[in-house]
Image (cartoon, rainbow, N blue to C red):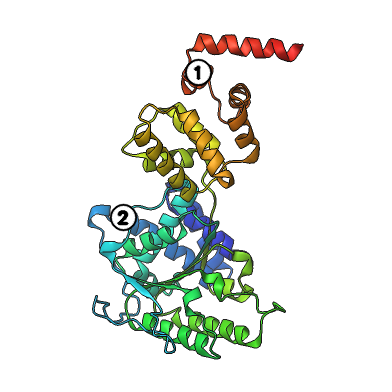
Amino acid sequence: MKYFNIIQALCRSMMATPNDAVVHQINRLKDSLAKDGNEKEAKTLEAILSAAQSAVEMSPSKLQQSFVIAGGEELTKKTQVPVDRETSTPLAEVFFPADLPDEMPLFDDNIRLAIQSIVNEWKVYDRLLEINASPASSCLIFGLPGTGKTHLAKWIAKQLGLPVVLARLEGLMSSFLGTTSRNIGSLFAFANRYRCLLLLDEFDAIAKLRNDSQEVGEVKRVVNTLLQSLDSRHEKGFTIGVTNHESLLDPAIWRRFDIQIEIPKPATEVLMSLLKQFLQPLNFGESEIKFLAWCLEGGTGADAETLAKWVKRAYVIEEKANIVWVMKQFALLNSGRVAAIKRNVMVHSDDDLIEMLLKDKSYSFKQKDVASLFGMNPSTLSKLLSKLNDSSKI
């Protein structure tokens, strides 16, 4: 059925926070599909409804993992991971549930709810299989560096109670003819043998466009090996691919992943929350956090963490440091993280910076907030603004 993958994604998102009206409409759609002979699609919607209902009924503190995907042997700390025959370099690294993150990275509500709906579905994987619902078993996570993609993949594994077999695909590549394909085969054979989540990081290292005229036949053979390996794993375990360069991926690779999630740069509210989190145990006022977010506009979670560490160091060295002074130093030494127009104003003119902040409607800085940032009282700022206004009329 054309566009059903979009309908399926919409239903998943809505069932992350279901209400009676949403459930009713999805049931109507399911019944209509079944009536028209689209049994497979109807069963898929039935599975989404069942998964969401199960998630609601189970208390999070008592939730038991119900899926039994392909059984598989249990991974232990003594299990030997496969190695490259030529160099003896391990092809993967294993992370056990106790070592995985407890918290999902901070995302906006839409992304967070969509991800939670996928986790809820995977937690009842065996129930979906029982009704022939063909649940998703693979996911591609893509977006800019520093947006929390690998952290997210590990968190998903934590929610499922599965160890992670992490392979950075750059490490599978070899200059020896045929070795890269053999490494891929060894990795997937290992992951298929054990009960785990296979995490393929730096996915674009191998999964390049097969029609790239600069690539030789060996790379095309490698891509074909990867495609076959992904196909063979579909019924045997969960797989997550992570990439910063989704445009390099072969179209056939995209089709191997049931779910595709783009992780965007954080919105202003999310960026402020990240800054508060990374700045702990230091406490800053709302206007200071907003100013930091303004300086870092368009940055990633990794940029927020870098800035927070910078601010912490500055306040240890100079306890009474002014946040504006700290950010001027940051802008000078981290030019790639602050927009050029803001950086130029910050390092050259306090007056221009004050005017820029007050004119930026998207952040809604109040005069009292700006006065506080610059260590002056509101009346002093008002006089300065009047003076600047008079000067502009001359």
Nearer to the camera, 88 or 365:
88
Image coords of residue 156 (percent x, y): 38, 61
Image coords of residue 95 (percent x, y): 32, 68
Q: Quadrant of residue 240?
A: bottom left
Mark number displayed over residue 297:
none
Image coords of residue 43 (percent x, y): 47, 69
Q: Secondary structure at mark 2?
A: loop
**Residue named by callout 2:** 102
Q: Nearer the viewer, mark 1 or mark 2?
A: 1
Q: Is residue 121 left or right of residue 351?
A: left
**Residue named by callout 1:** 371
Given contact means CB atoms under 8 Å apart, are the residues at marks 1 and 2 in contact? Answer: no
Which comes sooner in the sequence, label 1 or label 2? 2
Placement of 84 over or under 370, stated as above or below: below
Nearer to the camera, 25 or 335:
335
Q: Amino acid at mark 2?
A: Asp
The residue depicted at 47 percent of the width and 76 percent of the height is 171
Image coords of residue 374 (percent x, y): 49, 21
Placement of 88 over or under 281, stated as above or below: below
Q: Is residue 125 left or right of residue 216?
A: left
